[in-house]
Image (tube, rainbow, N blue to C red):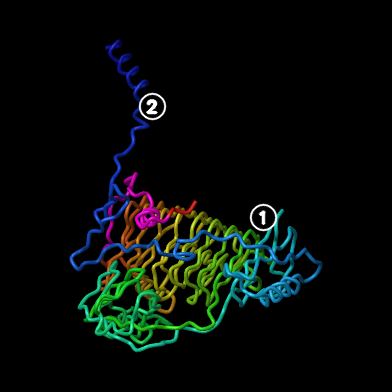
Amino acid sequence: MKIKSIFALSILLICGPMLSFVKEKAWSSKFLQLNKDASITYFPDEKGNTIPDFSLVGYHHGEKDLPRVKIVKTVEPVKGDAGTAIQSAINEVSAFPVGKDGFRGAILLKKGDYSIAGTVNIHTDGIVLMGEGNNAQGTRLIAAGKGSRSLLKVSGKGRITESGNRVKITDAYVPAGAKSFQVSSAKEFKAGDRIIVYRPGTDNWIHDLKMDQIVERDGTRQWKANEYNLSYEREITAVNGNKISIDNPIVMALDQQYGGGEVFKYDYNGRIKEVGIENILFESEYAGDTDEDHGWVAVDFDHIENGWISNVTSRFFGFGCVSLNSGAKNITVKKSRCFDAKSIITGSRRYSFNNNGQQNLFIDLETTEGRHDYVTGAKTCGPNVFYRSKSRNTHADIGPHHRWSSGTLYDNIDTDGEINVQDRGNWGSGHGWAGVTQVIWNCKVKAAAIQNPWVSGKNYAIGVQGLKVKGRLGDKPDGEWEGQYKTDLQPASLYEAQLKARGVKAPI
């Protein structure tokens, strides 16, 4: 027996290390298949809905690298309030003509500290504001003194306005993932037209979603149909008869029983483009860990398309590093960090990377001490993507925060907190259903609650490494869970696979 035991122990010692390197078998989702030629086959559900193509997000839909723009103005650190010197440089370059490359030029802020009492503003196209490093030895912009504010605000003006006649979408049901549909008449449309795909809110939709039945408490508001009209910005790629094809997919099913949809051409006069922020450390002064009368947002974008924020770090702001508002479209936010927020830990604070815009990409980010670190707001219209980002010491959850965000991909997010897509009930003033067509792909979490709304689509949890929980209201339909705790999901990144499928190189 002793000889047999020694032999068995010898085998274990020899084979044990080998067994620890046995790789779990690669697996694929039942919702899509990656083909040998890099194309993707999507498998529809009973209504035709598929996981959408999320790859046409970010700066110029991911089809252009972030440019290197010629420096035309240099600013040195100054004593006292440096906001005036920086604003003066921006105003000067704003008067330069726009070159053939679409830019007026870059403003370089040399290494050093820049104390700023107010807000620095960029209101014109074609300006890049760059520093010489996003750390204490680089370019540091400091929100000095008191006052809850954005330190850097990049914004044009205006809003979406109709520039043509509306036409009805005639399909009984246009599923999520679709890139074409039939209309009553396409004679006024052509390839290249910028259009709104309009989805009206209706009373029967809100009733079937049970958002007129939110449990009441002080301040609770039931959903109202006229507050849920959704406008998705798209571009026509082809017109064949009365069939219109579009660049980005439908991310919430258009169902005739809930009002269907309409299409119209639009203008956005005053929206700016081609603005970048690079290589800067943003800090806020503060009086204590719960101080709220100090810098609130480091970089704030609105009324802009095709811009970027790259290699920035923020520290001590009450709200977050980057906030993209509803007029921000095709923005790339990359290689940036949001650390050590200072505020009370409660609602409306610590939204580290916040997105209310359309077709935006957040990639390679890191946060500490946030609440909603990678988050969308009320009625955010997708597609939007959060990819390859980490969150630590988080105080709330990642995901759609409230009121029906549609079409977001959370791809390879690593958090020590939760990712949730659920009916939030009467939280806030009656958040209700947080979102639809929310895809959680190959993410690491402490826990996740992924639920399906009663109508209008599904939410997906594919390859989630973490605990599955019921969420706040556990009596809601379960989301589409697949491969919990299974490793080696293929493709490892849905966003990168979708880029490759249309012949675009993945971001480095």
The residue drawn where x is 38% and y is 79% is: 195
Q: Are marks 2 and 1 in contact (CB under 8 Å)?
A: no
Instruction: State the residue in front, 246 or 366.
Output: 246
Outermost top residue = 3
x%, y% of residue 136?
A: 70, 55
Q: Is residue 287 visible?
A: no
x%, y% of residue 408?
A: 39, 65
- Residue 487: within the magenta? yes
The residue drawn where x is 72% and y is 73% is: 117
Disc 2: CA contacts within 10 A as few (<14), some (14-19) or many (>=20): few
The residue wearing badge 1 is 135
- Residue 260: within the magenta? no
Please provide the residue range marked out in magenta. 478-504
x%, y% of residue 409?
A: 39, 61
Looking at the rendered structure, the kind of residue marked 2 is: Pro
Sooner in the amino-acid sequence: mark 2 or mark 1: 2
Q: Is residue 182 above or below residue 286?
A: below
Outermost front residue = 100
The residue drawn where x is 28% and y is 70% is: 453
x%, y% of residue 320?
A: 56, 66
Cα–Cα gap, marks 2 and 1: 42 Å
Q: Is residue 72 left or right of residue 340?
A: right
User: Which quadrant of the structure image shows residue 161?
Assistant: bottom left
User: Which quadrant of the structure image shows residue 397?
Assistant: bottom left
Q: Which mark is residue 17?
A: 2
Labels in figure, total: 2
Q: Is residue 375 above or below residue 503?
A: below
User: Which quadrant of the structure image shows residue 311?
Assistant: bottom right
Q: Is residue 162 visible?
A: yes
Q: Is residue 507 left or right of residue 52?
A: right
Q: Secondary structure at mark 1?
A: loop
Instruction: State the residue in front, 74 or 159.
Output: 74
